[in-house]
Image (spheres, coloured by chain):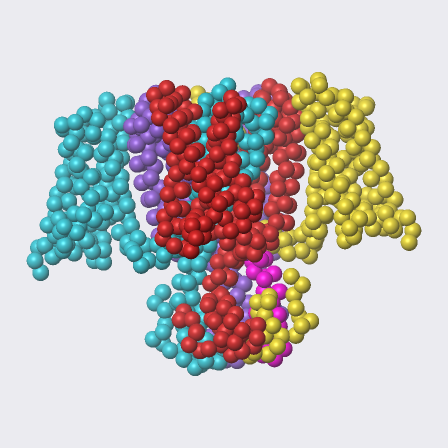
Chain colours: A yellow, B purple, C cyan, D red
Amino acid sequence: MGLRKRLGDIIFETNTPVSRGFDVVLLWAILLSVLAVMLEGVASIQVRFGTALRVLEWSFTGLFTVEYLVRIYSARKRLRYVGSFFGIVDLLAVLPSYLSLFFIGSQYFIVIRALRMLRVFRVLKLVRFLGEASVLSRALRASREKIVVFLVAVLTIVVIVGSVMFLVEGEASGYTNIPVSVYWAIVTLATVGYGDIIPTTPLGRFLAAIVMILGYGVIAVPTGIVTTELARVSRENERRQHQHCHHCGLEEHDDDAVFCRRCGERLAPEAEPTA
Amino acid sequence: MGLRKRLGDIIFETNTPVSRGFDVVLLWAILLSVLAVMLEGVASIQVRFGTALRVLEWSFTGLFTVEYLVRIYSARKRLRYVGSFFGIVDLLAVLPSYLSLFFIGSQYFIVIRALRMLRVFRVLKLVRFLGEASVLSRALRASREKIVVFLVAVLTIVVIVGSVMFLVEGEASGYTNIPVSVYWAIVTLATVGYGDIIPTTPLGRFLAAIVMILGYGVIAVPTGIVTTELARVSRENERRQHQHCHHCGLEEHDDDAVFCRRCGERLAPEAEPTA
Amino acid sequence: MGLRKRLGDIIFETNTPVSRGFDVVLLWAILLSVLAVMLEGVASIQVRFGTALRVLEWSFTGLFTVEYLVRIYSARKRLRYVGSFFGIVDLLAVLPSYLSLFFIGSQYFIVIRALRMLRVFRVLKLVRFLGEASVLSRALRASREKIVVFLVAVLTIVVIVGSVMFLVEGEASGYTNIPVSVYWAIVTLATVGYGDIIPTTPLGRFLAAIVMILGYGVIAVPTGIVTTELARVSRENERRQHQHCHHCGLEEHDDDAVFCRRCGERLAPEAEPTA
Amino acid sequence: MGLRKRLGDIIFETNTPVSRGFDVVLLWAILLSVLAVMLEGVASIQVRFGTALRVLEWSFTGLFTVEYLVRIYSARKRLRYVGSFFGIVDLLAVLPSYLSLFFIGSQYFIVIRALRMLRVFRVLKLVRFLGEASVLSRALRASREKIVVFLVAVLTIVVIVGSVMFLVEGEASGYTNIPVSVYWAIVTLATVGYGDIIPTTPLGRFLAAIVMILGYGVIAVPTGIVTTELARVSRENERRQHQHCHHCGLEEHDDDAVFCRRCGERLAPEAEPTA
C-alpha cells in the first residue's frame, strides 16, 4: 500500500482508530486556533500575550497549510476535493494569514477558520446527514414549502407592523424611518427585545402587546415543523429496525424480540438489528 | 382561444411554465417595490437617491395598476375577483400612490403593498391551505377552543399580575398606572423584556421571577398545540397513501387496506404501496 | 316551572340559546368593567372621563351585585355555590367597590374582577377540562413529577449560577447580593433579559453565555412535556372515534369508512361517529 | 433489627412512611437553609436579622453535620456512600460553614448547599431516571450526537456572526473585540437581548435581523429533540402494558401480543389489557 493511499485513509476515512484520532486532534487544533485569533483581538490580552498568540497562530497556519497540501496530495480525486465545500473551507482557513502580510485588516478574516469546526460532522460520521439521499435533507426538502411560507408570512407581518408603528410612534421614540421600525418589529417578534427602540405612546404599546402575543403563535410554527419532521424520521427509523416474521409476515417487533408476538414463530436470526 | 381566456390562464392559473414565470416575476416586483418604499423613508438615502426611488415607485405603481386592470378584464367572474381578498389587496396596493398626489402623508400607506407578498401562497399552490375545506383550516378550527382559552388565560394572568405589580412597585419604577403595568406583564410573559419598565423592589423582583417561570409553561402551550396539529396532519397524510379503488374511485386508503372502505371492493394488488 | 328554576337554567346552564346569550353578554360586561377600572388609573383619562368611568364602574358593580344575589337565589344548592371557586370570585368581584367607600386604596382590588374572565371556561363548555375526572387534569397529574423535577432543577441551577455570578461580577455590575444575582439568573434563563443587571467582566460574560445556551435546553423541557401530553390526549381521542368491525374485530377505521378495510364487511351504522 | 439497619432504612429507603417523612423534612430544611444564606447577603436584612440568620445557619450546619455522620454510620457500604455523588454533595454542604471560621469569603460557598435540593430526585423515587439503564439516560445517549452537532453548529454560527458584526459595527457600538461580539451573538441568538451591545448601523441591524430569524430555527431544534425523545418514551411506555408471561416471567409486551416475544409461550388471555 503506497504512502498516498495510506495518508488518504487516515485523513479522509473515519473508520480506523488512527483516522479517528487524527480527526479528534484536528478538531481540537481548529478550536484552539479559533480561540487564539479571538483572544488576539482583546486589547488587554494582546498587550501581555501578543507575541505568544502570534507564534501560536502562525504555528496553526503552518499546520493547516501542511494538512491542506497533504489532503490535495492524497485525495483520490484531487480536483474534486479542491472544489468541494470542505476543500474551499480548508483553503480559506489559511489564506487570510498569508494575506495579512500584505494587506492590513485581512487578519480579521482568519476567523473564517471557525467554518472548519463543521468538520465535526465528518468525525461523527454525520456526512450522510448532509448527503443528497439522506433522511434529514429529504425531510428538509419536504418542509421547504412550509418554511418559505413561514418566512414570507413573518416578512409581511414585520413590514406591515413596522410601518404602522412608524406612523403611530414617530421619530420621538426612535422609530426614525420604516426600515428601523421593521427592525424593531423583528427584534420584538423574535422576543429578543433589546430596548433601544421602544413604544412610548399608549396606542403604540397596545399594538406592541398584540405583536408579542402574536409572536407566541409565530415562534410555535418553526418548532412545530422541526419537531414533526424529527418525530417522523425517528418513527421511520424505529419502524425500520423492527424484524420481519417469515411465518405470518408481521413486521413490527421490539428490538429484543426472539419470537413473533402474533404467531409465536421464532424470528430469523439474520434479521437481528445491529442496534 | 380568445385574448381574455389566454391572459386569464397566465394570470390566474399556476400550472403552465408561462404562468409560473409570471408569478415569480410578480413576486420579485412586489418585493422590490416594498423595498423601494421603505428605503425612501430613510433620510440619508432620500437625499442621494430620492429621484431614482420616486421614479421606481411610480413605475411599480403603473405596473401594478395595469396588472390590476388586466386581472379585472380577464377574470372569469369579474365582480367576484374585485370583491375577493386578493382583489381588495391589489387595489389597496396602488391606491395610496395616487392619493399621495392629493393628501400629504398618505404615501406611507404604500407599504400596504407588502400584503401582496401573500401572493406567494398562490405561487406555491398553497391556496388549498387557505381554502374552506383544507386540512390546515380544519386543524385550526379544531384547536379554536384551545386558542381562545389560551388567550383568555393569558389576558387574565397579565391583568392580575399587572395590577399586583402596580401596587407593589408604584410609579417610582415606571409602573405609572395599571395599563402600563399590564403592558409590562405582557412584555415579560412573552420573554421580550425591553427593560424600560423593570421591578426594583425585592418583592417586585420575586413576583417578576414567578411570572417568568410561569411564562415557561405559557409559551409551551401554543407550541404544543401547533406541533400536535401539524403532527396529526402529517400522520394522516402519511397513512393515506394513494391506493386507487377501481370501483368507486376513492383514492385515499390506509397502507394495510385490502378492501375499499367506501364501497367494499377489493383493492388492486399492484396498487400496493412499497412502504 | 318556577321562577327560581327558570333563572337557574338561564344562569347556570349553557345549553339553551337564552343561557348562551346571557353568558356572552356577561363576558362582555366583565371585559368592559375590567377595562374601565384599568383606564380609571391613567391620569390623563381620569381628568377627562373620570366621572363617566366612575358611573360606569358603579353600574357594573350594581349589575354584578344583582347577578350575584340572583345566582344565590336560583342555585340548586345555595351554600355549595357560595363556597365554590366561582362563587367566591363573584363575591370578590363586587366587594372592593363597596370597601372603597370606607377604605382608601381598596378600589385597586377591583381588578380582581379580571378573575371573572375565567367564566369563559364555562361558556365554552370547558368546565370538563377543569373537572376531577377530565383528560387534561389526568394528563397534568401524570406529568406532575416531571414538572416538580423541572422546577427543582431550575431552582438549583439559578441559585448556583446566581451565587457564582455574585462572586465573579461583584457589586460594580449590579450584582449587589445573592438574591439579586439569582433574580438575574432567572431573567437570563427565561430569555427575558431586561438589561438592568448585566455581566461586564470577560469571565462573567463567558459564564452568562453558558447559562444562555443551557437555557435553550431548559426551555425545551416544559414545551416537550406539554406537547407530549397534548399529543397523547389527541391520539387517544382520535383512536376512540374509530369504529369497531363486528366481523374481524379490527378497531381502527377512518371516520368516513363504511366498509372494514381488512375483511370488507359493512361496518355497523350505530357505531358511526357523531363528528 | 440493629440501630444501624433501622437508621439506614429511614435515611436511605423511600418506601416506608417514616422514611418519606424524613425526606420531606430534610428537603424543607435544605430549602430554608439556602434561603437563610441568600438573605444573609442582603445588606438591609443583615442589619436587622443578622444574628437570627447566623444562629439559623449554624443550626442547619449542625443538623446537616449530624445527618452526614449518621449517613456514614448507617450506610450499608460506607466508602461507596462517601465517594458517591450525594455523599460528596452532603460533605460540600457543611464544609464551607466550618471553613468560614478560618478563611474570609468562604461563607459564600455555603450556597453549594443548594445542590442538596437535588435530593428531591430521591424523594420522588426518580433515581431510576438517573440510573445507568434508565429510559431517560438511554434517550439522552441516543440523541447525544444530535446535541453535539447542534452545539457545534451554534458555536460556528456565533463565531462567524460575531466576527462579521465586529467588522461591520466596530467599537463605536460596543463591539470592542471579537469575543465581545461573539458574546453579543449568543445573547441575540438565545433571544435574551440585554441591550448593552446593540447594532446601530443599517448593515449591522440588517445582519442582526437575519440572525434573529435564524434564531427561530435554532431554538426549535433542542425543543424538537427533547419533545421527540419524550414522545418516544411515552409511546413505548403506553404500548408496553403489563402482560405477564407465566412461563419466562417477561412483563413488558405490546397490547396486541398473543405470544411472549422472549420464549414464544402463549400469553394468558385474562391478562389482556382492557383498553
Name the residue located 51 percent from the left edge and 51 percent from the top edge.
D76
Q: Farthest right residue?
A: A2
Q: Residue at x 72, y 21 (%)?
A: A49
Q: Nearer the viewer, residue A99 or A203?
A: A99
Point out the residue furthest to the left here.
Answer: C2
Quadrant (top left/top right/bottom left/bottom right) for the N terminus of chain A: bottom right
Residue nearer the viewer, B250 or C53: C53
Q: Which residues are magenta?
A: A226-252
Q: Is residue C238 magenta?
A: no
**Viewer can see residue B263:** no
Left or right of A160 on screen, residue A6: right
Pinpoint residue A35: horizontal percent, then vertical percent.
Answer: 69, 31
Q: What percent of the width, then of the height, locates residue D48?
A: 34, 21
User: Whole-percent x and y of residue C234?
Assistant: 42, 59
Which of the 4 quarters of the picture holds residue D176? top right
Compared with C88, C57 (above or below) is above
Query: x, y (%) of residue C235?
Result: 44, 61
